[in-house]
Image (cartoon, grey):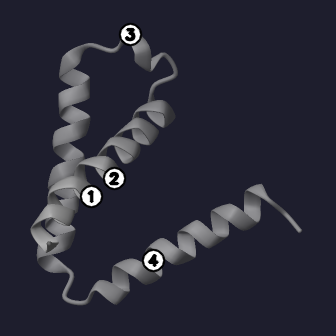
């Protein structure tokens, strides 16, 4: 059960995060060389691995993600 979720959840989240990072940094990301794609992917994987290894409580990560996401939503969709 849980292994199945982990196998399929991380690649889907990784794909969207990598696509967002690539579109923010590079304006014409459709013509990038492969080494940039692999570098961004490797750095993203290492960063998420280090967070998973060294952050002792998942509530810290959820709190930071929620605060950044809420701020972004309030900025883009003002009342």
Residue picked out by circle 4: 64
**Residues at marks 4 and 3, CA–CA distance in whole angstroms:** 33 Å
Find out whether the residues at labels 2 and 3 contact each other: C-beta distance under 8 Å: no
Q: Residues within 10 Å of mark 2 (few under 14, many from 20)?
A: few
For mark 4, give the secondary structure.
helix
Q: Which residue is mark 2?
A: 13
Above or below: residue 3 compared with residue 66? above
Instruction: Tell me the element at label 2.
Output: helix
Look at the picture and state if 72 lies above or below 18.
Answer: below
Question: Is 62 positioned to the left or the right of 2 in the image?
Answer: right
Which residue is drawn at the image coordinates 26% and 13% (left, top)? 33
Q: Going by the picture, which residue comes out furthest to the right?
A: 79
Q: CA distance from mark 2 to mark 4?
A: 17 Å
User: Is the C-beta separation of discs 2 and 1 under 8 Å?
Assistant: yes
The image quadrant that residue 51 belongs to is bottom left
Q: Is residue 29 left or right of residue 50?
A: right
């Amino acid at each position: 059960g849980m292994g199945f979720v982990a196998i399929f959840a991380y690649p889907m989240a990784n794909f969207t995060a990598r696509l967002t990072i690539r579109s923010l940094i590079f304006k014409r990301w459709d013509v990038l060389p492969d080494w940039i794609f692999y570098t961004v992917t490797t750095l993203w994987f290492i960063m998420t691995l280090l967070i998973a290894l060294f952050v002792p409580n998942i509530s810290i990560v959820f709190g930071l993600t929620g605060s950044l996401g809420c701020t972004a939503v309030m900025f883009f969709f003002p009342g």
